[in-house]
Amino acid sequence: MNIVDRQINYDRRGKKKVVLFFPTPAYGHYRIELGLAIAVVAAPLEGKFDLRLVDERVTPNYEQAVLNNLDDAVCVGISSITGYQIKRGIAMARLVRAMDPEVPIVWGGYHPSLFPEQCCQSQACDVVCVGQGDVTFPEIVESLAAGKPPEGVAGSVYWTGSGVVSNPPRPLANINDVLPAPYHLLDVNRAIALNQSQNHERIHTIEFHSSQGCPGKCGYCADAQLYQRHWTGLDAERVVKEVSQIVKTYNLDQVNFSDANFFANQKRVQAICEGFIREGLGIRWVASARPDTFHRFKPEVLELIRKSGCKRIIVGAESAAGPVLELINKGATAEDHLKTARVCRDYGIGGTFTFITGFPHPPGTPPQETTEDLLNFIEKIKQISPDIRTKIFVFTPYPGTPLYDLAIKYGMPEPGSLEEWADYNPATLKESVWVGPEERRLIEKVNGFYYPFAYPDSNMQMKLGDGGLKKIPYHVLHSLALARTRHHFYNLPFEWMLFKTFKKQTFEPIA
Ligand code: B12
Ligand code: SF4
């Protein structure tokens, strides 16, 4: 079918349902992080429409949960980031089309926001909500319910039989004007239960989004494109109130902040921590921090961060080589990473430092930093505190970022349609020209096995602790792994092969 053949009907007068679908976001094994995006965009429609939120990972019979509601649907909304989530979104869109070709399909999220026109060229998508959806999506729905396409709805782009129409962009909304995320529209208890049964989580953990955007300009990060380097945070009191509510409602032990940069404003962080302590929340929390700012926090604030339950910060260190840090515009140095590691150690705050290998460089030239170089630097961090987790990722250039443009310049082929983007993700980019198969295997070994065993965190230490014959294998693996990481010798990894045969799951989740 080509684009003009669609049987879409934008006149949705008399329809009452709004169906929102959150496809599985990533290929491979990830813990379930709530699909907050579809809840946030649905919030202003509560009470006016019959809302059906479906998460592929969580909702039982998710296909039927979408398809059974099409007869009375104003539209079906689909959320997506670049890569695998598109694949799953397209699969659902095809089922929707086959069942009822008239229902408009609206896409939103990072990827459609970067390529709205290209998305609308696909049979899987009629309308794109560009950027924040909290105001734009309700306006799209109201327009359809009034019998019209989203003509004039700022921030929307839509297909018509004669081409794609792009409305003017919508200015960024202040996050404080946005309604609280309606967790009750998602099946939170089931997501928690699934994380416990599938991901071996012993505690109740869910996500909270307390700010948006980031003033940073890291060359690989998609955030700047969507939020234009503008950071806004929910007022501290609102964070404390809403977090307290979800903690009580879902009997939570831990809250993971999914903010791009939770620690952007020291005063706000201080007030949030004071609020958590005042309310006696007694939870653990985890959030992302920039390596150049966290170690500059005042000692009394760092103390409050620990006291209020901060179990771990996630630090995007990415590299330790000056030229690479410059290339990626990190705004931090290797010394910043080490200082942040010392602060974590001194204040009893856990840390996960993430690194990236395989940044683009001109064909025929050597990389400015190899995985071996990263491993040398990781050793320095482990010497500061063995409790700090580390993880190396293989670089994937994300569209809308300067490093993506560089990768294209150096010869990376560019996907040309929504369907082609569906196969673009780190797990399938095995042919990445900047990281060979040997290096990939090395990364797999150190991430999932050698570092967790060589430098056991508190979980692993429990297993290594005294008593019982069962501890013996852990002690043997620990000694072997320690010797290997110290001497960078990973050939003939017999213990790793053995481990992989018996244990399906790798150690050390990021949070
Ligand atoms: C939670 C999360 C995940 C989760 C779930 C992903 C998801 N789709 O939510 C998991 C752990 C699986 C994940 C994995 C990865 N992630 Co991630 N992740 C995030 C994170 C931290 C939070 C997303 C979130 O929940 N935000 C809260 C909601 C409310 O905001 P939102 O999603 O932006 O939604 C708003 C709009 O986009 C829009 N909207 C969104 N959906 C919809 C749907 C409709 C119908 C409408 C109308 C509007 C709409 O309205 C919402 C409200 O304004 C973001 C960073 C960030 N802080 O945003 C990165 C981010 C989304 N991840 C990213 C990346 C790169 C990854 C990984 C590749 C990382 C890695 N190295 O492994 C992997 C693998 C992904 C893959 N394709 O294979 C990038 C995405 C870049 C891109 N071009 O898509 C981000 C932006 C990080 C970054 N700054 O670069 N991630
Ligand atoms: S600090 Fe993090 S969120 Fe901010 S620009 Fe860099 S990678 Fe993106």
Image (tube, rainbow, N blue to C red):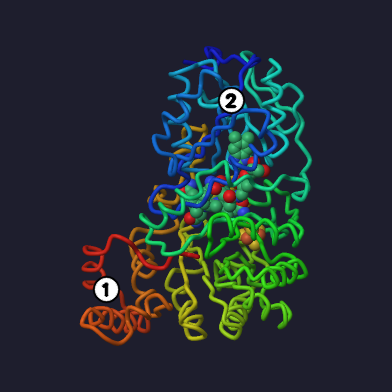
Amino acid at pointer 2: Lys
Residue occupying the point 64% across, 60% down:
244
The CB of the residue at mark 2 lies under 8 Å from ligand 1: no
Question: Disc number at residue 133?
Answer: none
67 versus 333 height, above or below? above
- Element marked by disc 1: loop
The reply to whether residue 403 is in sight is no
Q: Amino acid at mark 1?
A: Asn
Task: Establish if 507 lies above or below 485.
Answer: above
Is residue 404 toward the left or the right of residue 202 in the image? Answer: right
| Pair 2/1: label in front | 2
Question: Which of disc 1 and disc 2 is earlier in sequence?
Answer: 2
Q: Position of residue 225 (x, y in %)?
A: 67, 47
Residue corresponding to mark 1: 491
Please provide percent x and percent y for residue 155: 72, 33
Q: Which residue is mark 2?
A: 17
